[in-house]
């Protein structure tokens, strides 16, 4: 099952390459689902020495204060034979055979991310070590817990480190390696304190006790190592690291491991525990446990990956296709987007989507109400009729019927209908513009390309403006037609009034009496109402024919004509996708590739079982 750890190693490296290292993200994260071992300890707890003992190499930076300022993901790969070497995730094609250079690169890479300000960063460093003397294992070395900030660090550094450590170890898939020094009271151990908070039952915590050889004479760590002082589900493991003097003298790890084995085997208090003490045993037990945890998590990983692939594919589909590279492809892409917009616009007008009903409301409520507010009866009041009739006669009074007076009364009344007619045209124009804006917001593809969205919107509005002017001209012509030619039947009825009681022998001037003028006003009002009723039906027909129908037929025709004249570079300016969306699609595509590769790799491992 050694390939299980290698599988997780590959997935972790791929995750970090995408910027996925377990932090909150708008993108789904695989990192949090992968089993890992996090090394936790206070400063000067011997945490770095434990890692070096497990690896068998002196490769970690040393010094006072906070030395580890970024998580170090340490991936150990066992070689059957060959020379040992190291590789960094940020330098994938460079092999390090000098581990002093590895130490320097860790320090330099830390400074590249955090600067020389002694601040911390949650972005991990990836280090892979290939050696015949290691077991297959992955460990995450976290910054040491501290109680006070040193010079050059903010006062919040203590909380920041604790929050970072907690963000790793509180995840249920994380195995905690809690490193505590034996020469300090276990009750004050930073590692035990923080691990107890996230794992109160000790079900995923391994306790490591360092500096056993530095305890005061007459004291020992047997109670802790036997699990009586603080019980964990897994046995405590004691290690004896190199002393500072050994480090200064460059005592190699092989000699240090031999001395460690001899210490536990020859010290009376620890003889009975020697078989499960030491850094070699620690590495083997962690490797074996990590493999078993990974194996148990495979079904859950497969489920998570399958679900996430569906979600990523769905969002990528929603974001749309990437931009074509050739002019023909760009033109086709723009035309398809415009057709999608045009289709949505038509659906609004046809009632498939809401909004088209507002146009009917203009015809059924707004126009009739506006016509009613004209109040023709006031226009045809006695004094106004008298004034227009006498003015129309000029120097020659009318002989039988005041035809010119009738015409002037009718024309001045009908001309006022132009106002409601124009208002109806403007109202429908406003609704059509509103539907264009709504259709643009509902056309998903247009959201990708701000410039195309602006151009399509401008072209649609220009087309609507042109249709509005044509509609207004046609609609006003309807009113002008009624003004320019009166219905003949209206005049043919006038002589009947004489037969029904009129006396043509009366003086011309007697015809200006109130009764006569009232009859004229009543007749004109009747005619105007008849014409108004006719226009109430014909004005909507004209507006629909000139504006609505044409908008459905040819809203973007002019735009399409101009589009065909553009070159590839000009078409490219229309497809200037929002950088945020472009970046989102790239990130999603990379993440989808990661999950598909993870799916294939995990499936192959699952089948090999």
Image (cartoon, helix red, strand yellow):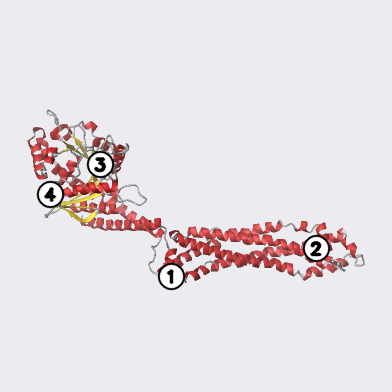
For label 1, the crowd category at 10 Å Cα-Cα, with few meaning under 14, some 14 to 19 and many 20 or more, is few
Q: Which residue is mark 4?
A: 133
Mark carried by residue 567 = 1
Image location of residue 118, percent across then percent down: 27, 42
Among the two numbered marks 3 and 2 on one chain, the one whose residue lies closer to the N terminus: 3
Helix, strand or loop at disc 2? helix
Q: CA distance from mark 3 to mark 2?
A: 100 Å
Along the line of sight, the residue nearer the viewer: 436 or 291: 436
Helix, strand or loop at disc 1? loop
| Rendered view: 195 above or below 328 | above
Among the two numbered marks 4 and 3 on one chain, the one whose residue lies closer to the N terminus: 4
Q: Horizontal placement of 451 versus 592: left or right?
A: right
Q: Which residue is mark 2?
A: 523
> Of circles 1 and 3, which is in front?
1
Along the line of sight, the residue nearer the viewer: 448 or 589: 448
> Of circles 1 and 4, which is in front?
1
> Of circles 4 and 3, which is in front?
3
Question: Cβ–Cβ below 8 Å for labels 1 and 4?
Answer: no
For label 3, the crowd category at 10 Å Cα-Cα, with few meaning under 14, some 14 to 19 and many 20 or more, is many
Question: Cβ–Cβ below 8 Å for labels 1 and 3?
Answer: no
């Amino acid at each position: 099952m050694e390939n299980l750890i290698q599988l997780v190693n590959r997935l972790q490296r791929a995750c970090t390459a995408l910027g996925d290292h377990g932090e909150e993200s708008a993108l789904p994260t695989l990192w949090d689902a992968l089993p890992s071992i996090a090394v936790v300890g206070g400063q000067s707890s011997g945490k770095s020495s434990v890692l070096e003992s497990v690896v068998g190499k002196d490769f970690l930076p040393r010094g006072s204060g906070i030395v580890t300022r970024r998580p170090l993901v340490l991936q150990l790969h066992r070689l059957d034979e060959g020379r040992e070497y190291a590789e960094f995730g940020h330098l994938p094609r460079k092999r390090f055979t000098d581990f002093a250079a590895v130490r320097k690169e860790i320090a330099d890479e830390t400074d590249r991310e955090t600067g020389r300000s002694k601040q911390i960063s949650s972005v991990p460093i990836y280090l892979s070590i290939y050696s015949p003397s290691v077991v297959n294992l992955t460990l995450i070395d976290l910054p040491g817990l501290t109680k006070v900030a040193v010079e050059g660090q903010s006062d919040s550094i203590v909380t920041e480190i604790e929050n970072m450590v907690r963000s790793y170890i509180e995840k249920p898939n994380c195995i905690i390696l809690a490193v505590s020094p034996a020469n300090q009271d276990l009750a004050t151990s930073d590692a035990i304190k923080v691990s107890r908070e996230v794992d109160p039952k000790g079900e995923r915590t391994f306790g490591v006790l360092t500096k056993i050889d530095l305890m005061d004479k007459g004291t020992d760590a047997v109670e802790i190592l036997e699990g009586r002082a603080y019980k964990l589900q897994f046995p405590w493991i004691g290690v004896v690291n190199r002393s500072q003097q050994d480090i200064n003298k460059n005592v190699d790890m092989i000699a240090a491991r031999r001395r460690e084995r001899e210490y536990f085997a020859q010290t009376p208090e620890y003889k009975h525990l020697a078989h499960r003490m030491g850094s070699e045993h620690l590495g083997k037990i962690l490797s074996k446990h990590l493999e078993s945890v990974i194996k148990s998590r495979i079904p859950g990983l497969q489920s998570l990956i399958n679900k996430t692939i569906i979600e990523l594919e769905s969002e990528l589909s929603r974001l749309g296709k990437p931009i074509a590279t050739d002019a023909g492809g760009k033109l086709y892409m723009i035309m398809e987007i415009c057709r999608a917009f045009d289709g949505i616009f038509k659906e609004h007008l046809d009632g498939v989507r809401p909004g088209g009903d507002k146009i009917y409301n203009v015809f059924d409520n707004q126009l009739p109400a506006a016509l009613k507010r004209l109040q023709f009866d006031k226009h045809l009041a006695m004094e106004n009729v008298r004034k227009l009739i006498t003015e129309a006669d000029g120097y020659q009074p009318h002989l039988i019927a005041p035809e010119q007076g009738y015409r002037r009364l009718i024309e001045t009344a009908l001309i006022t209908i132009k106002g409601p007619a124009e208002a109806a045209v403007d109202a429908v124009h406003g609704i059509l513009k509103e539907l264009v804006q709504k259709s643009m917001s509902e056309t998903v593809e247009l959201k990708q390309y701000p410039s195309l969205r602006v151009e399509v919107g401008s072209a649609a509005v220009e087309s609507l403006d042109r249709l509005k002017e044509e509609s207004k001209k046609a609609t006003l012509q309807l009113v002008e037609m009624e003004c320019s030619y009166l219905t003949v039947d209206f005049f043919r009825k006038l002589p009947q009034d004489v037969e029904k009681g009129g006396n043509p022998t009366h003086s011309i001037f007697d015809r200006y009496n109130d009764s006569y003028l009232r009859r004229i006003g009543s007749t004109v009002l009747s005619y105007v109402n008849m014409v108004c009723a006719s226009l109430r039906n014909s004005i909507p027909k004209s507006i629909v024919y000139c504006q609505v129908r044409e908008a459905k037929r040819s809203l973007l025709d002019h735009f399409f004509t101009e589009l065909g004249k553009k070159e590839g570079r000009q078409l490219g300016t229309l497809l200037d996708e929002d950088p945020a969306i472009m970046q989102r699609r790239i990130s999603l595509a990379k993440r989808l590739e990661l999950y598909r590769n993870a799916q294939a790799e995990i499936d192959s491992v699952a089948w090999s079982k």
